[in-house]
Amino acid sequence: MIRSLKIMDGCKGTQVHAFPVKPNRFEPNRSNNQTVKPVSNFNAVVSSEGVILPTTELLEPEIEASLKPIHFVEILADLHRRIENCEGEFEKFGVFLEQSAVFRGLPDLKLFRQCLRLVRGHAVDVHEKVVVAAWLRYERREDELVGSVSAMECSGRNLECPKASLVQGYDPESVFDHCLCFRRKDDDEFKIVVNYDCDGDFVEECSNYDGSCENDDDDNNNNNDDVCFCIGDDEIICNRYLVASLSRPLQTMLYGGFIESRREKINFSKNEVSIETMVAVKVFSRTNRLSNFPPNVVLELLCFANRFCCEEMKNSCEAHLASLVCDMDDAVSLVEYGLEESAYLLVAACLQVFLRELPGSMQCSSFINLYCTPEGRDRLAKAGHASFVLYYFLSQVAIEEDVKSNTTVMLLERLVECAVKSWQKQLACHQLGVVMFERKEYKDAQHWFEAAVEAGHIYSSVGVARAKYKRGHVYSAFKIINSLISDYKPVGWMYQERSLYCTGKEKILDLLYATELDPTLSFPYKYRAVAFLEENEIGAAIMEINKIIGFKVSPDCLDLRAWFLIALGDYEGAFRDVRAIMTLDPNYMMFSGNMHGDRLVELLRPVAQKWSQADCWMHLYDRWSSVDDIGSLAVVHKMLENDPGKSILRFRQSLLLLRLNCQKAAMRSLRLARNHSSSVHERLVYEGWILYDTGHREEALAKAEESISIQRSFEAFFLKAYALADSCLDSDSSKYVIDLLEEALRCPSDGLRKGQALNNLGSIYVDCDNLDLAADCYKHALNIKHTRAHQGLARVYHLQNKHKAAYDEMTKLIEKARNNASAYEKRSEYCDRDTAKCDLSMATQLDPLRTYAYRYRAAVLMDNQKEAAAIAEVSRAISFKPDPQLLHLRAAFHDSMGDYVSSVRDCEAALCLDPSLQKEDENLENMDLKSRRTINFNVPLLSTRRLGCSVVADTSCTLQNTRVPFSWEQAPGKPKDIERSSSVRDGDTPRLRLPPCLWHQLKEAVGADIDNGIQARDECIASNAESDLEVFGHDLTHAVSNKFIDLEQQWASVQEQKKTSLKIEKDKLRTQMLLSMYASVTNIVPNLDDESKISDIVEKDKNVVDKFEYDSSKIPTQDVCNDIWNTISS
């Protein structure tokens, strides 16, 4: 609905396809300390580069090229149900593939990769295994230890093993096991090489064939040779029976009614069979081996097998040729033979090389002809290698490489042709529309977006509106988005899109709505910032863009802030942001793709301060201590310019990138650190960190121990301690970790790393209840400016009942740290509820991705019996961050209110996001609905107070039954165990408990039984009454009528009792859930054995059980409440 006539006026205007470039109205502030001459020189140089300055007219958000369901939680729940209800295991491949397409649009790529592993695990045929294994390798290409590793190298597991992918069969359990690529038996003169055959078994072949392998067989069979095949003047003597056993046609020819069956010599000269091929046929008929025949002979043998239907021979030839495909040259030369002979396995081997060489193989002309053209797709389809998953993978790679290329368009066209299911059509048409839009072919883009909408993808309406807008139909575009807002539950991207077709206050208001509904959208921040810039309010522009940079670092936002700082004359700040951009993405083009970052660095260098390497270390120390991660990145980038081979700097760079939640860039830096390491022990440490961050904890420990055996170093001991602490530590394990950290501190290192070691050592001491030693560690860390130690010291003060000191300690951290959202969140634990609310509101404002604040506020609202408001608070975060913990919490709220359908939906969605919760789903199915429901004191995620857990250890480990587990967030909204493990098979993580939410079935069943009983009773009474009337006549009518009245009263009484019973049961369930929540919030577990007394057990962070008892008949209720509250606060 149009809200004002002003929008009508704006919509009636004609569309401008190319906006004129505005002149630069914002000269740098010359009141800055920079001299005038460098500033003018810099502006002149920038102008000569043809840089287009940012304006509000040129800004518009990108259309996401992925599935974006409008009812995301419902889609997740539906996917989970379909996975669980698959009739056959083979159907799960398609459902998991659809799930991966949905996860592709989420910010956390780990979810997509985990789902892709499940897709590979449920792949059935060789084609699916080859495609998904290559896709997995492509996704983790940044994790490779060496950048130049061969594409056909095996990762050591069946999941990505190129040879295991060529094995037919379905075995989802073994896909994560170590593979057996080859086995060799060393001998001076003889070697047996083991390969997979077409059935997945191991076959042995002579690697130095000279005919000896057949000699024994020849001696035994020469006497039985009874047929001679003549080719020209040559004769090949064979065993008639053995040759006939190769296939039914040969058997018919040699033993049937044909004339060849009676001849000893058969002329094969006209069958286009060479002498070498016939010899190979003879050898294979006797040994079932291909031995060391040249590839051309095996190819001819494959043709022979196809002609005479020799299936076993064909399979052996395919397996042998497939084992020879090792690089692109082999694949290019053999794929044509495979297609001509319909050799499924050979084509699969060639396809595997093409896919594992991506994106480089896209430059090959053979690739274009085979995979991009309709004719090539038809040829692949005949060989069984044209599928949706293949073109889905190829199109994603093409989009990442060059979204506007012709190759991308052709691959997406093939993807549309392969799309069969609804979600496949939605994805293919939407992505093709996005590509056409980027190519500025707006008419075609509109067509494909409309096809996606017709298939059911509502988000593609954004593309339809945008294409119409570009073609001049502004009002039509506005109506499309406006109808979305009115027809569906509004979300942030709807208001963001509608703002493009509004003007003035309406535009700003829509952008504010978009930010309120989804604070992770970057376009509203960028638009408001540029609008401030156009009003010459540069300070306000920087403040606006800083809001999103504070919790979501991206090159485009840093790019914009760099320009603002240049306009302000703050060249040092601009230099910092440009260097940070180059760290995040070395190939990033700044200023709307008009200038490479390296070029801007060169332009800024004359007006920036000159730092020596010693100055850089000093600045790095200061910025690291002030928790200025972007500033630290810039300093490290500067230091790497002077010393690019310094591996320790690359390692520091990876640590900073992990803090900023830039996983991909962090792994790239860590790999470069490994490649530039100057010693073996140093390289082993970096390899250990790579293995640890990719979920291979045991392998990482082995690397650390190997490094220590070579040379004792700080990093090796620290890696080993960190990996060991990533579990539930008992007293002996904790002592061992303490010894490792102390050994690390004895080794030489700088203050930055030793501060981290001291901080981690302090947390282990806290877990061991050595508070004095922990305080010493934290204070020592603070002495060397490790600012984060304030948080650990505050925790010690809190455990020592020094609440004011704990609060003050966190206040110091807030004052010192540049990124302090987590500090506000932590300080909320050391103050009263009102102050905690203020701190958590600030934490949400600084970083909306942190979920603890939403959960705390929701728990408080539930405590105040404001169920609807509590659900709305959690739903607000779920709308832009569908987190399993949030979904589980909302499910518990729905269950407490009796909304069982919504509760089950949220539980299923949480299970879909986290497959490791599958066992809890089995518990849900096996729940005894007839058993009495009891209070569950282990209901997770309802606590509004964090428990004291180790920063190093896996703090989300299983706790005792009297405590509510709480997962510490290492990155915004992500528990540490999720950050550290990318494997869905890691089974040591805690399981979220599902709320019991199927009890309504019991109540419905009981109600049905009561109704059936009453109905039967009524029928019986009516029948008896009718008999009485017949016997006694009309004189008894009045008496019978009285009976009916009594029965009706009895029926009404039963109905009333049933309603009362149901109400009592519902109130009881609600009370039990509230008691469970109170236990979760307060950490107090009530003892309900004696209701006349208030007897409770409190388990504090020190794992100490305190028992206390109040007699409500002797102590005033107000005093009891105050005393209990003081106990909770302490």
Image (cartoon, rainbow, N blue to C red):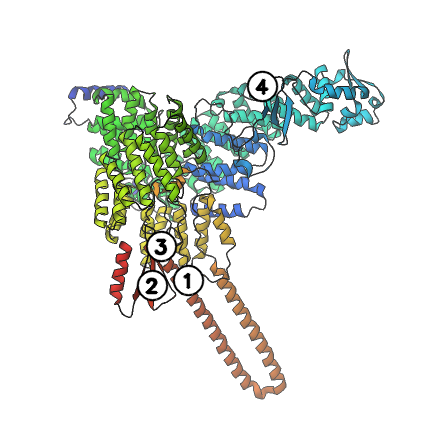
- 776 to the left or right of 372: left
| Residue sitting at x 80%, y 23% | 240
Find numbered disc 4 in the image and state the secondary structure of the residue it sits on.
helix
Look at discs 4 and 2 and give the one toward the viewer: 2
Query: Is the C-beta separation of discs 4 and 3 under 8 Å?
Result: no
Amino acid carrying mark 4 in the image: Ser
- Please name the residue that numbered disc 4 is placed on: 333
Residues at marks 1 and 2, CA–CA distance in whole angstroms: 22 Å
Amino acid carrying mark 3 in the image: Ser
Q: Give the mark nearer the N terminus: 3 vs 1.
A: 1
Q: Is residue 839 above or below residue 378?
A: below
Q: Is residue 906 visible?
A: yes
Nearer to us in this view, 491 or 229: 229
Amino acid carrying mark 2 in the image: Ser
Look at discs 2 and 3 and give the one toward the viewer: 2
Residues at marks 2 and 3, CA–CA distance in whole angstroms: 17 Å
Q: Which mark is residue 1080?
A: 3
Q: Which mark is residue 1069?
A: 1
Q: Is residue 485 above or below residue 301?
A: below
Dot 4: within a 10 Å radius of its alpha carbon, few (fewer than 14), some, or many (20 or more) residues?
Answer: few
Q: Give the mark nearer the N terminus: 1 vs 2.
A: 1
Q: Is residue 1051 above or below residue 636?
A: below
- Please name the residue that numbered disc 2 is placed on: 1095
Residues at marks 4 and 2, CA–CA distance in whole angstroms: 82 Å
